[in-house]
Image (cartoon, helix red, strand yellow):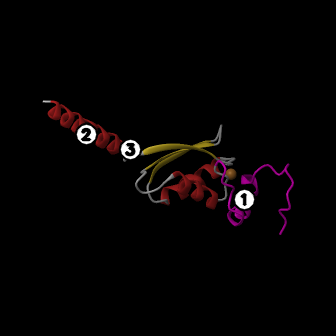
Amino acid sequence: MKKHLVGFIAVLLLTLGFNAQASDDKEKEVKIKTSAICEMCKERIERNLAFEKGVKESSLNLTDKVITVKYNPKKTDVSKIKANIAKTGYDADEVTADEKSYSKLPGCCKKSSSMSHGDHQ
Ligand SMILES: [Cu+2]
């Protein structure tokens, strides 16, 4: 009887474990702070993210500059999503914008120029 009970509990725990894992495979959501400024930035970032494997949906809020990305954790992860945004020319949390992409952005889309850093060509 005791053995059966132990077996039953083991099966129960396994089932619960699998269920937890299964729900983990479903789409996840992450919020990333970007350096987007205007509507063009928003479109640019969202468009490029749409090409990133595993990204299902992204929506940038221009008020707080936070982008909400829905993704498949089996196909991509947060660091790849941040790298994609950086490659577009924008900061993504602790990841700084790719310099080359950033330099190609229209002037209105660049981070506040009040912080002077040698950005001459
Ligand atoms: Cu812009």
Nearer-the-camera pick, 114 or 16? 16
Q: Secondary structure at mark 1?
A: loop
Left or right: 59, with 87 as reference point: left
Rendered position, 64 above or below 94: above
Nearer-the-camera pick, 74 or 8? 8
Q: Amino acid at mark 2?
A: Thr
Q: Which residues are magenta?
A: 93-121
Q: Quote the CA–CA distance across marks 3 and 2.
A: 14 Å
Numbered mark located on residue 27 in the image: none
- Asked if the stretch drawn in magenta spans residue 22, the answer is no
Farthest bottom residue in view: 121
Which of the two discs, 1 and 3, sits closer to the camera? 3
Residue drawn at point x = 29 percent, y = 43 percent: 18
Numbered mark located on residue 24 in the image: 3
Q: Is mark 1 within 8 Å of ligand 1?
A: yes
- Asked if the stretch drawn in magenta spans residue 103, the answer is yes
Residue bearing the label numbered 1: 106
